[in-house]
Amino acid sequence: MIVYTIFAGRRENLEIQCVYIDKLLNDNLIDEVHLWDFSRKHSDGEYLLEISQKTKYKLMHVENKKSWKEYYEYYEKYTDGIVIKSDDDIVFIDVNAFADFISFVKSNDYLLYFPSIVNNGVCAYWQQFHGFIPKTLDIYFHEQYCGSLWKNTRGKATRLHQYFIDNWREFCKLHRESKHVVEHKQGHRISINWFACKCDGNTNVYTELLKHTNDNGILDDEKHITVTVPPIVDKNISIYMNMVVAHLSFFSQITKYMPIDLLRDGYRNISKM
């Protein structure tokens, strides 16, 4: 069972992401889509209700939209499957590499499995390290938390997005041919824009998260999942560089005059190809 879950809210982003999700469903690469309703606007909530009527889509109601706890408690009960967690502003997925990504998940024993994420502080470093981002664009550091990419300092994130939009075919082709897997060090943080995990009798990250933190609201789930839990269960995090997804924005970038609408239009055009 492969369940694709979304912290869902903003229609303008989900309309793009669902193009890729529908392709994954049509190719039988995922089994169900769970839309967790964290919407803040009535119109976004109406859109979630609308798309939840599609086959294999399920709307998940949230009582407390200021807490992620209901989400984690729900998947704590899963015992036989793969759960993918996605933010609602994932605006590109290399569906041609998805089957290989799932094969990697099934055949390895990491706690979390990340793809190569565009607009992610840690992934950007490895993308440049392996030659996927030219140094003439900018220098991308290994930024585990906040940092210059997160802040869009001097347009750093904007330039990366535009480079990907202009070169996405070659960018993905190089990734698919790379065969690089990065083992993310225990105790190092990474933004959880999109990841997969196994929920089985061996290790369920959601079980471990709830077991080893007193943060009842799971206010900093990212820190607990990527920093607190891995050394406790003695499992590493992997970044599977063969598959690319693109994450549109952090809240800090929106406040730094990132041209969100322009970039979103670029990703929307890619989704139609």
Image: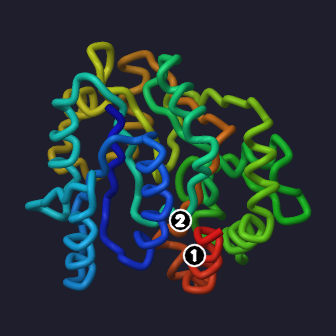
Q: How far apart are marks 1 and 2 (CA)?
A: 8 Å
In this orientation, which residue lies closer to the viewer: 205 or 52? Answer: 52
In this orientation, which residue lies closer to the viewer: 137 or 55? Answer: 55
Q: What amino acid does circle 2 point to? A: Val
Tell me where residue 183 appears, x and y as whole percent: 62, 27
45 in relation to 228, above or below:
below
Q: Can residue 224 be seen in this view?
A: no
Q: Name the residue under label 2.
A: 91
Tell me where residue 169 appears, x and y as whole percent: 77, 58
Residue at 67% over, 68% down: 157
Return the mark for residue 268: 1
- Closer to the chain start, of discs 1 and 2, is 2
In this orientation, which residue lies closer to the viewer: 11 or 122? Answer: 11
153 in relation to 23, above or below:
below
Callout 1 crowding tier (Cα within 10 Å): few <14, some 14–19, many ≥20: some
Q: Do the residues labelled 1 and 2 touch (CB within 8 Å)?
A: yes
For mark 1, give the secondary structure.
Answer: helix
Residue at 44% over, 55% down: 21
Q: Is residue 51 visible?
A: yes
**Nearer to us: label 1 or label 2:** 1
Residue at 47% over, 22% down: 106
199 in relation to 193, above or below:
above
136 in relation to 12, above or below:
above
Residue at 43% over, 16% down: 234
**Quadrant (top left, top right, bottom left, bottom right) of the C terminus:** bottom right
For mark 2, give the secondary structure.
Answer: strand
